[in-house]
Amino acid sequence: MKNPTKTSKPVHIVVLGAGFGGLTFCKQLQMPGARITLVDRTNHHLFQSLLYQVATCGLSAPDIAQPVRSIMSDRPDVTVLLDNVAGFDLDQNRVRLEKNTLSYDYLVLALGGQTGYFGHPEWERFAPGLKSLDDALRIRSHVLLSFEQAENEANTAEHDKLMTIVVVGGGPTGVELAGSFAELTRTVLKRDFRRIDPTQARIILIEASPNLLSNFPQDLSASARQQLEALGVQVRTETSVKDIREGEIIHAANVVWAAGVSATPLTKKLGVELDRAGRVKVNPDLSLPGHPEIFAIGDMAFVPQADGKPVLGVSPAAIQMAAHVANIIEQKAMFAANPSFRPAFKYWDKGTMATIGHSAAVAWIGKLKFSGPLTWLAWLFVHLIFLIGFRNRTSVFFQWAYSYFSYKRSARLITNRPLKIEPEKPTPQLTPSPAIL
Amino acid sequence: MKNPTKTSKPVHIVVLGAGFGGLTFCKQLQMPGARITLVDRTNHHLFQSLLYQVATCGLSAPDIAQPVRSIMSDRPDVTVLLDNVAGFDLDQNRVRLEKNTLSYDYLVLALGGQTGYFGHPEWERFAPGLKSLDDALRIRSHVLLSFEQAENEANTAEHDKLMTIVVVGGGPTGVELAGSFAELTRTVLKRDFRRIDPTQARIILIEASPNLLSNFPQDLSASARQQLEALGVQVRTETSVKDIREGEIIHAANVVWAAGVSATPLTKKLGVELDRAGRVKVNPDLSLPGHPEIFAIGDMAFVPQADGKPVLGVSPAAIQMAAHVANIIEQKAMFAANPSFRPAFKYWDKGTMATIGHSAAVAWIGKLKFSGPLTWLAWLFVHLIFLIGFRNRTSVFFQWAYSYFSYKRSARLITNRPLKIEPEKPTPQLTPSPAIL
């Protein structure tokens, strides 16, 4: 007889979300007798940090996404479901999905965030955010189509509008997007048009606060700004977007929103206390107040640190939180008597980096600050290491090398045809605060 | 003074379509003083022969497409326009596009074909064809989503329907699609589900005539059938599709139409004689009857050969026709007096090949017939050689090698979210001729 002492009832753990948090939890948890159901609304894990490269024609969608099933194929204890969360019955230990209802012993909430418009959901229409592959493919098609239309356009005002790209938000995503758009127009598209001059396209980066990359030390922010301006980006700090509508101040056919992130709106259905960005205020062990069997991790969790600042919504934080929760659940016998014995989560900040363009980047690791080509190289390798899937890693490396040396980008495709800009559509324009511009 | 003798008025050549025909024409034509305008409705040249690999998760879209502008960037004499053809004023030597009107000295029609439904356009809704990247991405998402839904489905009949893929048409595209779907379900998806068994998915290939690959010699057709059946494909020849609607005979969530090709419907606007498939009946030199300044090439041209059979709608034919027309236009002075001195087009058939799956293929070159793994290897290299763009070639080679050795496919992404199968939609089902099934 094998394992005659093992008599415990199998534990069922439901994990919602297959981002860095949910996936790390599943990979980390090694618990005999446990059964995991992993639910996501898409069929793939997305490496969001490189999404801007899909939007700017550098990488193709499959390079930065991996099917969740394929990542979990060697884990017979993990069942993957493609489904949407409909609601929670926390008192009955049940999650209602659109097509299934799941009972759980432990529930791990790792549903991530979404683009936040500061109470202006109507802006999304004119300024799409960058959270999913579909977002990125749409932005890519829209920008390429604008240049095609400019090539066909005789009217100067219309022409200038088509050749203007506005990126709202000077955080890492905004900086990376603006730098990458500048390179796309300055080098890649340079010789491809006969009537327009893509190098004259306006790339405008708008940031409300006085500095780009406001989480970085000020000298790195200044360096990022300088590197962006060298690429031809117009940086406008202390500029807040007042209204995105058919205004008069900046006419732009392309506006990308990289300014705000809020937690998934599903947190509202939990009936627990949330912060202003909609994140769940968790206990120090990351469990929900009053629910030791439920944990929230990653971008949807509000976790204050010793200095009072919350942990940033970045993938290393989600990964560390996932490992923390996996440890607690694995040692459940130890904490069963009193959940207050559970250890508190402590974030280890390994540093932050942002890339700006062809061999330009800034990084900040502990007390050390870096910028320039070597930082860019380091950025490259850190991102390659974290890309899940051998094939993706090699393909991405190859495409980076190709576009680095050839100044070409291979993924310059207009697909998603329904998104063709109709002339009768209201023209998306941007009116930043007139006091400042 | 440079070129003091050059006094001739510049010649303007309009090329409609950036497929193999249009692109080869532009690359081939070296004519001082000529100006080319190349018009396409998409921004990319598509390597259609590999489209089935995008539909079956093997390659990503950018691997088989290259921006037309980037292909023509070193040709300042070529202007590329993204536009749709609206109509022709042949007597005024003018083409009307949606956004431009172009006057021409020579007009090269290379607009290709579209999926033909034999007079049943309503079938397209249930059985999409495979002609564009959007088609391929939609089929990919639809098939992957069906398996996800099957994993969630308790009802057996519904479950079986979701796990049935029907390919209509046993030509090279149908054979390649069916073989590739069989491999996807038999090997790639094998271990990824917990409730359904993807290896039990039904892949049905329907062909109206007695043999698959009817252009091939009969023993190769038989070999193709055998190789497909070994992969688990149910081949039904002498079976014609009677009606695609909410029928009862084969319940399939996924139907792909690979049965018919017809010329672009724009040929109807030319006011010249067409064949049954809508192709333009050209003169032996490929010019339009009554219009020595207009040529039709590729899939939209009906070109009878010595044996009475028309030239097949394949890329080598389009390439050869393009070169033929470029020669005639380059030597225009010689033929100006009498266009009837122009040489007749003669097709050189270099052979045909079709791949069936992981190291299975058939080929037919002159009197030689091949099948098996070595043929598959030859197919691989022929297709790599013809892929336009260094980066695509290397990336495709790498991905093929990866999926060959790992039995994985990297492009297993569900995107294009609007195409989510809604339960209230009429269920696409297929009713083949009841007399035969």
Image (tube, coloured by chain):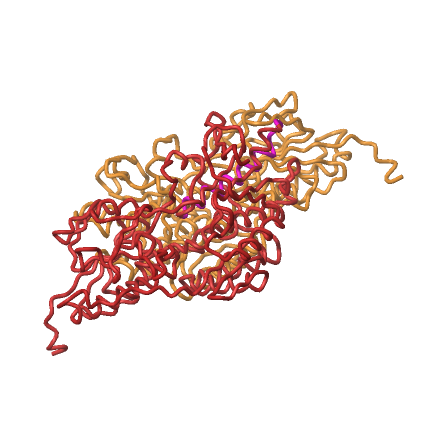
Chain colours: A orange, B red
Question: Residue A117 in the image: x percent, y percent?
Answer: 39, 34
Predominant secondary structure, magenta span: helix
User: Residue B74 is drawn in which quadrant?
Assistant: bottom left
Which residue is nearer to you in this view: A205 or B30?
Answer: B30
Outermost residue to the right: A1
Can residue A366 be seen here? The reply is: no
Q: Left or right? Give the position of B213 relative to A232.
A: right
Q: Quadrant of residue A193?
A: bottom left
Residue span colored magenta: B133-155
In the rendered image, the vertical position of residue A311 relative to residue A270, given as above or below:
below
Above or below, comparing residue B365 to residue B424 in the picture: below
- Residue B41 point in image, percent of width and height: 30, 49
Using residue A199 as the reference point, say whether residue B149 is left or right of it.
right
Instruction: Please indicate whether residue B166 sits to the left or right of residue B195 in the image.
Output: left
Residue occupying image coordinates x 77% and y 29%: A337
Hey, which residue is sitting farthest front in the picture?
Answer: B307
Any magenta on residue B374? no
